Amino acid sequence: MLSALLSFLGGSVFRMLWGEISAFINKRQDNAHELQMLQLQMTLDDRAHTRNQEAMQLQAQLGIKTIEAQSQAMVDKADADAFGEAMARAFGPTGYSAVDIWNGIVRPAAATIALGLWVCKLITQNFQMADWDMELVGAILGFFFADRSLGKRGR
């Protein structure tokens, strides 16, 4: 009878115990796996958040740099416009005939006086040109021919 009882309990009870133990072990493994997956997902989310924050910070910095560049371009344009207007006023007629005559002759008169002094120096040297004299001739020719021809083309 003991063997029948052991046989009955052994087959059913041990199978039931084994089923409960294996179910417990499976659930424990599933819970550990789920916990690892949640921790990995949390790590990935943190990294994605960090990347998004860095991207937003970079975009903000680029936006600030764009605004700075635009404002600098506006200041440069205003400076150029002001310079152009000042140049137009400086070379335009003033409305006073004496001032307009003076403005018209001051540059040619200064150039004529400077060239006259240079010719006097050359006469005293018997028209022997030194290095300085040759450099001066090159600068004058460059100004009157190259500078004016480039100015007419808008360069």
Image (spheres, rainbow, N blue to C red):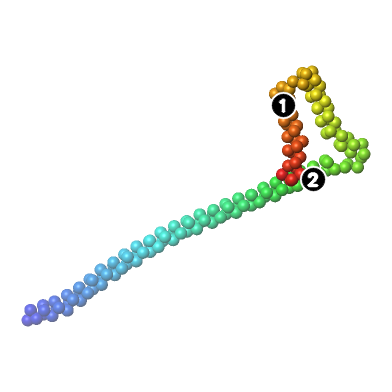
> Within 10 Å of the Cα at label 1, are there few (<14), some (14-19), or many (20+) other Cα atoms?
few
User: In percent of the image, x 15 and y 78: which residue is there?
Assistant: 11
Residue 26 image point, x, y percent? 27, 70
Q: Quadrant of the rendered structure where residue 41 is?
A: bottom left
Ranked by sequence position, the earlier of labels 1 and 2 is 2
Residue behind mark 1: 134
User: Front-most of 38 and 88?
Assistant: 88
Q: Amino acid at mark 1?
A: Met
Indicate left or right for 44 with 8 as reference.
right
Crowdedness near tag 2: few (<14), some (14–19) or many (≥20) residues, C-alpha within 10 Å: few
Does 9 appear above or below 81?
below
Q: Position of residue 35 (x, y in %)?
A: 35, 64
Q: Between 103 and 94, which is closer to the camera in this rendering?
A: 103
x, y (%) of residue 93?
88, 42
- Considering every residue shown, the one lying at the far right of the view is 97
Considering depth in this image, is 103 or 22 the residue closer to the camera? 103
Which of the image's four quarters has the N terminus?
bottom left
The quadrant holding residue 145 is top right
Task: Answer above or below: position of 57 versus 27.
Answer: above
Q: Which mark is residue 83?
A: none
Numbered badge on residue 85: 2
**For the point 83% across and 33% down, which residue is it?**
107
Q: Secondary structure at mark 2?
A: helix
User: From what the image shows, is residue 12 above or below residue 145?
Assistant: below
State the separation of the CA atoms marked 1 and 2: 37 Å
Q: Amino acid at mark 2?
A: Glu
Q: Quadrant of the C terminus?
A: top right
